[in-house]
Amino acid sequence: MNIVITIQHPAHVHFFKHTIRLLQRDGHRVDVFARVKDLVPYLLDHYGIDYEILAGEPASPREIPITQIRFEYGLLRACRRIDPDVMLTIGAPATTHVATLCGATALLFTDTEHARFQLGISVPFADRVYTVESFADDLGDHQIRYPGLHELAYLHPNRFEPDDIRSRYDIDPDRKLAVVRQISWEAVHDIGHSGFDQLETLVEELEADDVQVRITAEGELPSQLEPYQVTVPPEEIHDLLYHADVLIGESGTMTLESAVLGTPAVFVASFTAGVIEELESEYGLVCVPEERPTGVVDCAKRLLRIDSSVWEQRRQQLLDDKVDTTAFIHEEIQALDGAVSTRG
């Protein structure tokens, strides 16, 4: 088959990277088209994935619609040439629109309920909409719920083996480590939401308990927090999360990544998602504080007091209940291959 995969966020690279390799191994033609967003080109290059950039990164939120139109037009032109059988995306309206115009089967993946505008203009054009079981919304008859997580496409033990990188970042393995993640809040589905209040207070409280703090931030930090900032290559961030004792962050993706690695996470944001609620209520791997900033500190300290063996047990229960998401995607496309072959 001719298969097109679109990438518009660094997390999409991780989600699809193993699927791309499996499909190419099977003999399929796989074309990857991307929009520049943060470290997307860097990750695609790092993992040796051939790709074509169709649009740059918008300079401001006001330029996002123009960038998306440019991406969609470029994708349409490319697909007119390729004539794809199947197109895969995480939430991208352009992909489902172009698939409809080109007669391709559109497979849409999502785990983000609050991306309502994107879903509203992409879901109606998708042939299949794959959501995790905990996804709160009903997206119609073509919605397929599966027992997985996006993050298990690349952090399942079948796909990921951690390296010990602590010495590179001056981390003492005999002390507790808290990784703090601050985001820019510039993504379309993040507009209007917020995260940390009084980050300085959080760091002071953790340090008072002899907890090492390392901050990864998308923007600038106050001068008093700069000594805690670390710049971790994106291909090493999951190794850092694996060896941390707690993540405290505004990123929903990194919260989920941390949890599936067995590192408890405090999610600091003005919204939530079904998958985050599941990891909190069913597995106890996430804490969502009711109040900020006091609740954030309380959550972090409570998680740090729990023995590490408990987190490994909870992670194992999660892995027992969920599937290897890459294997699931591969099986779904293999089934489509049979249908295409029969048709052809």
Image (spheres, rainbow, N blue to C red):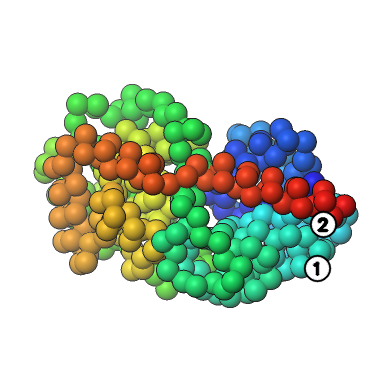
Picture coordinates of residue 110 (x, y %)? 53, 60
Q: Find the distance from the CA under tag 2 to the CA under tag 1.
A: 9 Å
**The label number, if any, that marks residue 235 in the structure image:** none
Determine crowd level at label 1: few under 14, some 14-19, many 20+ residues with C-alpha closer than 10 A. Answer: few
- The residue tagged 2 is 79
The amino acid type of the residue labelled 2 equals Cys
Labels 2 and 1 touching (C-beta < 8 A): yes
The amino acid type of the residue labelled 1 equals Leu
- The residue tagged 1 is 101
Near-viewer residue (175 or 271): 271
Residue 344 vertical placement versus 71 (above, below): above
Instruction: Tell which residue pokes out farthest to the left in this image.
Output: 208
Dot placed on the residue nearer the N-terminal end, 2 or 1: 2
Near-viewer residue (331 or 19): 331
Picture coordinates of residue 274 (x, y %)? 39, 63
Near-viewer residue (221 or 72): 72
| Residue shown at the point (77%, 40%) measured from the top left | 28
Residue 124 vertical placement versus 233 (above, below): below
Could one spot residue 282 in this view of the protein? Answer: yes
| Residue shown at the point (26%, 38%) measured from the top left | 313
